[in-house]
Amino acid sequence: DQQVKQNSPSLSVQEGRISILNCDYTNSMFDYFLWYKKYPAEGPTFLISISSIKDKNEDGRFTVFLNKSAKHLSLHIVPSQPGDSAVYFCAASETGNQFYFGTGTSLTVIP
Amino acid sequence: GAVVSQHPSRVICKSGTSVKIECRSLDFQATTMFWYRQFPKKSLMLMATSNEGSKATYEQGVEKDKFLINHASLTLSTLTVTSAHPEDSSFYICSVYRRNQPQHFGDGTRLSIL
């Protein structure tokens, strides 16, 4: 049973525009969320996190929004750059220990 | 954050071979490491939690006799895929757990069983 879902397997965005990646979860006990970026043949790289006490966390071009009532989080990248092209995974945990990952969204930023 | 080295990056071998994958924490003494498996277009699936000095904790459906985990030191965990078969072909990734920090991952091992 997939506790974390990314319903869009792929997304294409023009360079300079905003990329919005979405993630939904089912376990209301999750209290810590992360986004990872993954290039082919490499391990995931941590991008940004948010805890359930916040509804927004910003780091440069990357902002994560958390809507606890909807069990939804999103990653905004603005402006998008070609180097952002990668697969993005969201992950969630209850204890900060075991994480559950979404299936990933492949982002392509078109120059 | 933790720096994680995973080796080898790619393995191609015949069916029936046992394959060992190493995961090293280069800058942090890790009592806990995780092993994940990723199938094409699928999520990262946690296989087991590797605990230094004790037995690994396996997720439901993961055969512990098939996927042997050894965490003999604070900087090294190994995953051995015993008598590998084509269905074991996958991308295996380890990560290091550090309290109150995101997990940091190795670069993964692409295992292909012929």
Image (spheres, rainbow, N blue to C red):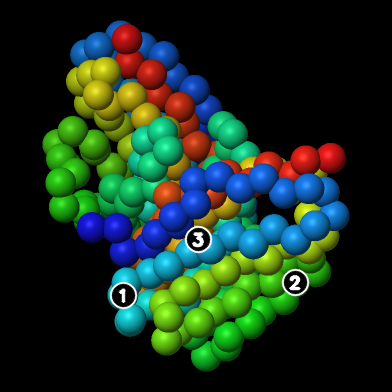
Q: Disc 3 is attached to a residue of which chain?
A: A
Mark 1 to mark 3: distance in Å? 14 Å
The chain under label 2 reads: A
Q: Is residue A102 above or below residue A67?
A: above
Pick the front one: B75 or A69? A69
Q: Amino acid at mark 1?
A: Asn
Q: Earlier in the sequence, mark 3 or mark 2?
A: 2
The spot of residue A51 in percent (x, y) is 52, 81
Task: Indicate the chain on which mark 1 is placed.
Answer: A
Query: A45 or B16: which is nearer to us?
Result: A45
Say the numbered circle drawn on residue A77: none
Q: Residues within 10 Å of mark 1 (few under 14, many from 20)?
A: few
For marks 1 and 2 on the same chain, the one whose residue lies earlier in the sequence: 1
Asked if residue A109 can be seen in this view, the reply is yes
> In this figure, which residue is indicated by the disc labeled 1?
A27
Q: Which residue is mark 2?
A: A59
- Mark 1 or 2: in front is 1
Asked which quadrant contains residue B102, the reply is bottom right
Residue A55, by quadrant, is: bottom right
Q: Secondary structure at mark 1?
A: loop
**Residues behind callouts 1 and 3 on a single chain:** yes
User: Image quadrant for the C terminus of chain B?
Assistant: top left
Q: Earlier in the sequence, mark 1 or mark 3?
A: 1
- Identify which residue is drawn at 28% across, 51% down: B48
The location of residue B97, given as percent across then percent down, is 46, 62
Mark 3 lies on a secondary structure that is strand
User: Helix, strand, or loop for circle 2?
Assistant: strand
> Residue at position x 19%, y 44% from top?
B62
